[in-house]
Amino acid sequence: EAQVTQNPRYLITVTGKKLTVTCSQNMNHEYMSWYRQDPGLGLRQIYYSMNVEVTDKGDVPEGYKVSRKEKRNFPLILESPSPNQTSLYFCASSKEVAEPSYNSPLHFGNGTRLTVT
Amino acid sequence: AQKITQTQPGMFVQEKEAVTLDCTYDTSDPSYGLFWYKQPSSGEMIFLIYQGSYDQQNATEGRYSLNFQKARKSANLVISASQLGDSAMYFCAMREYGNQFYFGTGTSLTVIP
C-alpha cells in the first residue's frame, strides 16, 4: 500500500530533550516536506526537500533540523524542544512535477501530536 | 502577502444541501495547481480534488466540484448533497513554480442533521 509513515503518533517530552520524528514513504517520491498545524494558522511549512541531500527552509524553520540521506526517509529533528513547538506535525511527499501541470498532490502521513512541557 | 486565503473560519450547512467553501490565491506564475484537502476530526489529511491553471473545465470528483475563476484568482470548493460525514476542516492549497505547496488557514464545516 502506498503510504507515508510517520512515528510516533503521540509524543510528550520536556523542554530541551532532543527528539526525532521519523518519516518514510514508499512511493519513490522526490519531494518531501514537514508541516506544523496550529489552530487558526493552518499548515505552515517547516522544511522541504526536492531530492536526496537537498533540503530547504520553509516558512517556520527555526528550532528544527532535517536530513535527506535516502530518498524514502525525511526525519524531523528538534535539538532542544521548547513549549512553543507543541503542535501537530505532518510529513508529506509528492512526485516532482514539471510545468505546466503541477498536478501531483501531497500525500500525508497520519500526523504526530507533540507536547513539550 | 498570503498565497492562499480562506476567509470563512467556520461554516454550517443543512444535511442534503450544497455548500461553497471559498478560496482565493495569489501568484504571478501562469502555471500552477490548486488542491483541496479534507481533515476529519481523526486528523488525517485527505486529498479531494485538483484543478490545473490551464484546465478549461472545472474539476469534479463525485460530490465535489471546484468553481475555478482564473481572472478572479478564486478556486471555491462546492460540496453537493452534504452528508454528516462531510463535517471536517477543509484546506485549500496551491502548488507553483519550484514545486512548493502553500496552504490556507482552513474552513471548519459542520453539517447539521
Image (spheres, coloured by chain):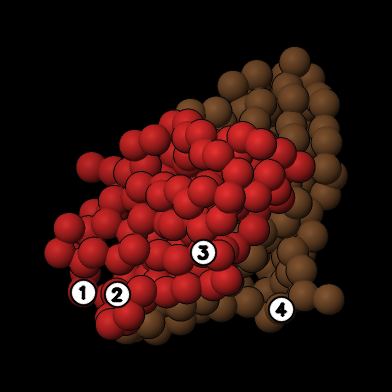
Chain colours: A brown, B red
User: Given the image, what chain letter belongs to the residue carrying mark 1?
Assistant: B
Depth-wise, is mark 4 or mark 3 nearer the camera?
3
The amino acid marked with disc number 4 is Met
Tag 4 secondary structure: loop
Depth-wise, is mark 1 or mark 3 nearer the camera?
3
The amino acid marked with disc number 2 is Ser
User: Given the image, what chain letter belongs to the residue carrying mark 4?
Assistant: A
**Apparent side of residue B46 relative to residue B59 in the rendered image (left or right):** right
Identify which residue is drawn at 51% across, 64% down: B64
- B78 and A26: which is toward the camera: B78
Compare marks 2 and 1 and give the one earlier in the sequence.
1
**CA separation, marks 4 and 2?**
26 Å
Residue B95 screen position, x and y as percent? 40, 65
Q: Residue B63 — which label?
A: none
The amino acid marked with disc number 3 is Tyr
| Crowd tier of the residue under label 1, counting other residues whose Cα lies within 10 Å: few below 14, some 14–19, many 20 or above | few
Label 2–label 1 contact, CB within 8 A = yes
Among the 4 quarters of the image, the one containing residue A8: top right
- B112 and A91: which is toward the camera: B112
**Apparent side of residue A16 relative to residue B104 in the rendered image (left or right):** right
Q: Which residue is mark 3?
A: B64
Q: Which residue is mark 4?
A: A27
Residue A89 screen position, x and y as percent? 66, 42
